Amino acid sequence: MTIERLMAVVPPPAAPSETFRGPWEPVEAKIGRELPPDYKAFVRLYGGGYFFTDAVMINVAGAVSRGARLEAQVPIICGSFTAGGDDQLPYRLWPEPDGLIPFGSTMDGDYIFWLPEGEPAAWTIVVWGRGLGTFEAFDCDMTDFLAGLVTGEIDPPEFPGELLSCDRLFVPFPPVPDWRRRIVFDDAAASSQRLSWRMGHAGSGPSGVSRIRLRGPK
């Protein structure tokens, strides 16, 4: 799938904020994986912002805020899961080659992950709900997942309620000065040169976790 379905239901903003056009090598070196093409198209066209006013945020490569920057949040979020030494999780987590890679969150503390199996264009979505602490798998890519949230075809049970009642489907981040963005990216690029490239390999998915396919509109 491509980003066109999302663009049909949520047009890109006329004045996006914190768009990212690359170079991608420093970002992917930090994460250790090539990233999906629909994600790269998303951050180029939509940039940083919130869906449903402020309910769902997608982390953006190179974002000025560390809390919104993809390459900063991946180790922080995965570290929060592994810090307790929980070995009962149904999925492996980054930096394992086939471990879940977080790329978004909700205002309630839920997390959205890629399941990095196969080529990046084929990666599907896993949601962790903070309330019950459970994972739910969705058989679609990132932009189809977002489009499904908007149309009501996808409705994770622990996501913030009444998303469809919101009339502000995507709100860009406030604009930031170009010089601040350059400082953040130049620092990240310099750091990436000290990292080894950790290319992951496709692994088998976890057992006992159901894949949830798109549901029809409510």
Image: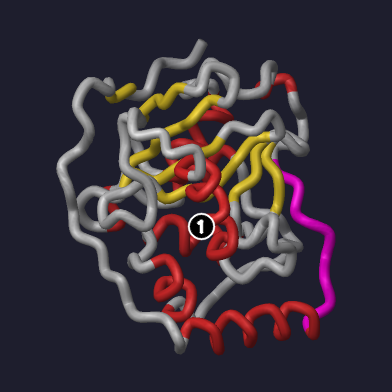
**Within the magenta stretch, is there residue 177?**
yes
Residue at x 28%, y 25% (from the top left corner): 211
In the depicted structure, whether residue 1 falls above or below residue 174: above
**Within the magenta stretch, is there residue 29?**
no
Q: Position of residue 197 (x, y in %)?
A: 32, 77
Residue at x 47%, y 64% (from the top left corner): 40
Q: Position of residue 104 (x, y in %)?
A: 56, 45
Q: Secondary structure at mark 1?
A: helix
Q: Which residues are magenta?
A: 170-178
Q: Label 1, on which residue?
A: 75
Q: Position of residue 85 (x, y in %)?
A: 43, 39
In the depicted structure, whether residue 155 falls above or below residue 149: above
Q: Position of residue 196 (x, y in %)?
A: 35, 80
- Amino acid tagged 1: Pro
Category of crowding for the residue at label 1, using alpha-carbon neighbours closer than 10 angstroms: few (below 14), some (14–19), many (at least 20): some
Give the quadrant of residue 119: bottom left
In this image, 146 relative to 122: left or right? right
Q: Nearer the viewer, residue 101 or 151?
A: 101
In the depicted structure, whether residue 18 falls above or below residue 50: below
Give the quadrant of residue 63: bottom right
In this image, 69 relative to 6: left or right? right
Residue at x 73%, y 59% (from the top left corner): 14
- Residue located farthest toward the front when viewing the structure as drawn: 85
- Residue located farthest toward the top when viewing the structure as drawn: 218
Q: Nearer the viewer, residue 196 or 105?
A: 196
